[in-house]
Image (cartoon, grey):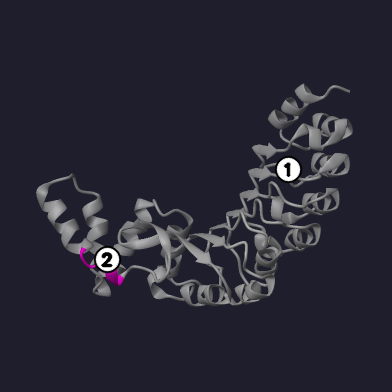
Amino acid sequence: MMSAIAAVEARILDDPDDAAAWAAYAPYLLEQGDVRCELVALAALEDTPAKREALARIDRERARWEPYQMTDCVWRHGFVVGATLRIDGRREARDLAQRMVDPKLRLLGSLRLTIAETVPARALTVLAAADLGRLRVLRAGYHPRGNRVARALVEQPSLKLHTLDLRHSGLTDEALIALAGCAQLRGLRALYLQHNRLTSRAVAALARSPALTGVEVLDLRHNAVGAVGAAALAESPLLGAITALHLHADELEPAGVHALATSSTLPRDIVRYWRAQDKT
């Protein structure tokens, strides 16, 4: 059973701007002798010289909270809630596992992986050893090793991702089919898959995946979705929550556009849009 503190931390991971969650967290920080409890209290006060002085005093201790080898850090009350890690080889990929168990990063909910194009696929096999279960947002696009990232996700014992971004990552049908069968991805709200190597076969598998149940944004542009893939999306009973379905009409063929325009399961606004594109 999740402890009360773990439940509060989960709320912060879900929404780093949840003031009520931070207020509930402050007493625990005080008990631990963590001066960041003051940051939570100061955030609610008007800007005064005394407040600025207190913030500056606490900020001088920030070096203790800086994560190792991470950049573009997003801070909330002295905690890193978002960061970027560059992977140039096996060492950095292996280091990710250490970063994800670092107490300094216990409220890290958003991670961007920038993977060098020169990194060999075998160097990324160690990604599966990193516990990504705390993350709510994972962005790992613009490199050719998307299949390795997908494999690491499939092997995770627990995932709570709300956003997964694998655009421009060389993702193939086999990798997306594996992701589609991953029960741990059922909390997704946004899935970005544009500009990969996907065909209608993988899109059809995705359309049948329970991972889509809560998805609000799905981007499949610049893939060979085709008429078959578009029809699978149009017929899917799992896309009831979707508010943005990004596809290029010229990648669907006229029959695919018509399938979307005549869908009886997609939300009305999306069907109305495709009806306007239907020239059949």
In the shown orientation, is residue 32 left or right of residue 5? left
Q: Residues within 10 Å of mark 2 (few under 14, many from 20)?
A: few
Front in this rendered view, residue 100 or 243: 100
Question: Which residue is tagged 1?
Answer: 222
Image coords of residue 160 (percent x, y)? 58, 62
What kind of element bears circle 2? helix
| Magenta highlight range | 60-64
Q: Could you tell me if residue 212 is visible in this image?
A: yes
CB contact under 8 Å: marks 2 and 1: no
Using the numbered discs, state the Cα–Cα distance from disc 2 to disc 1 in whole angstroms: 43 Å
Q: Residue at x 54, y 60 (%)?
A: 114
Q: Quadrant of residue 90?
A: bottom right
40 part of magenta stretch: no
Q: Residue at x 60, y 77 (%)?
A: 129
Q: Residue at x 75, y 47 (%)?
A: 238
Q: Earlier in the sequence, mark 2 or mark 1?
A: 2
In the shown orientation, is residue 259 left or right of residue 71? right
| 172 up-or-down from 267: above or below | below
Image coords of residue 150 (percent x, y)? 68, 64
Q: Amino acid at mark 1?
A: His
Q: Main secondary structure of the magenta part?
A: helix
Q: Amino acid at mark 2?
A: Arg
Labelled disc at residue 138? none
What kind of element bears circle 1? loop
Q: Nearer the viewer, mark 2 or mark 1?
A: 1
Q: Residue at x 82, y 31 (%)?
A: 257
Q: Could you tell me if residue 264 is visible in this image?
A: no
Front in this rendered view, residue 90 or 211: 90
Question: Which residue is tagged 2?
Answer: 62
Q: Quadrant of the C terminus?
A: top right
62 part of magenta stretch: yes
